[in-house]
Image (cartoon, rainbow, N blue to C red):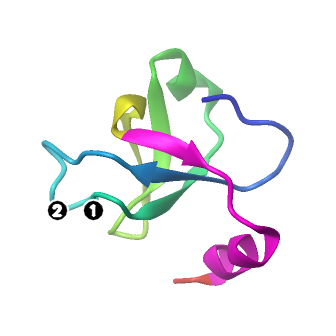
Amino acid sequence: MKQRGKETHYVVCLGNEGYRSSLVVRKIYRILPDSTAAKHKLLRVIDETGEDYLYPEKLFTAVELPRAAGRIFSIAP
């Protein structure tokens, strides 16, 4: 999943096998840019703990949020 500029990007969780306490299937998560992780097919995701951790990118798919929704997600706890 490529990221451009300083835009905030979001993904939806497709599966959580092995990460059931950290990820919720069908939930939208914010991701942070991490080019080193991307080389290893990992995403830096702000998960249910509120912290960012690396997860296999195969567990997610990118979603584009309308601008208003993006603002709400970016300020949510």
Residue 1 position (above or below residue 74): above
Q: Residue at x 78, y 78 (%)?
A: 68
- Residue 73 part of the magenta segment: yes
Q: Which mark is drawn over residue 24? A: 1
- Residue 63 part of the magenta segment: yes
Q: Position of residue 45 (x, y in %)?
A: 47, 50
Horizontal side, residue 71 vs residue 25: left or right: right
Q: Position of residue 34 (x, y in %)?
A: 61, 34
Q: Residues within 10 Å of mark 1 (few under 14, many from 20)?
A: some
Q: Nearer the viewer, residue 65 or 32?
A: 65
Q: Residues within 10 Å of mark 2 (few under 14, many from 20)?
A: few
Q: Amino acid at mark 2?
A: Ser
The magenta-colored residue range is 60-75
**Farthest residue in the right direction?**
5
**Farthest residue in the top direction?**
39
Query: Which residue bears the numbered disc 2?
Result: 21
Q: Residue at x 42, y 70 (%)?
A: 50
Q: Amino acid at mark 1?
A: Val
Q: Position of residue 12 (x, y in %)?
A: 45, 53
Q: CA distance from mark 2 to mark 1?
A: 8 Å
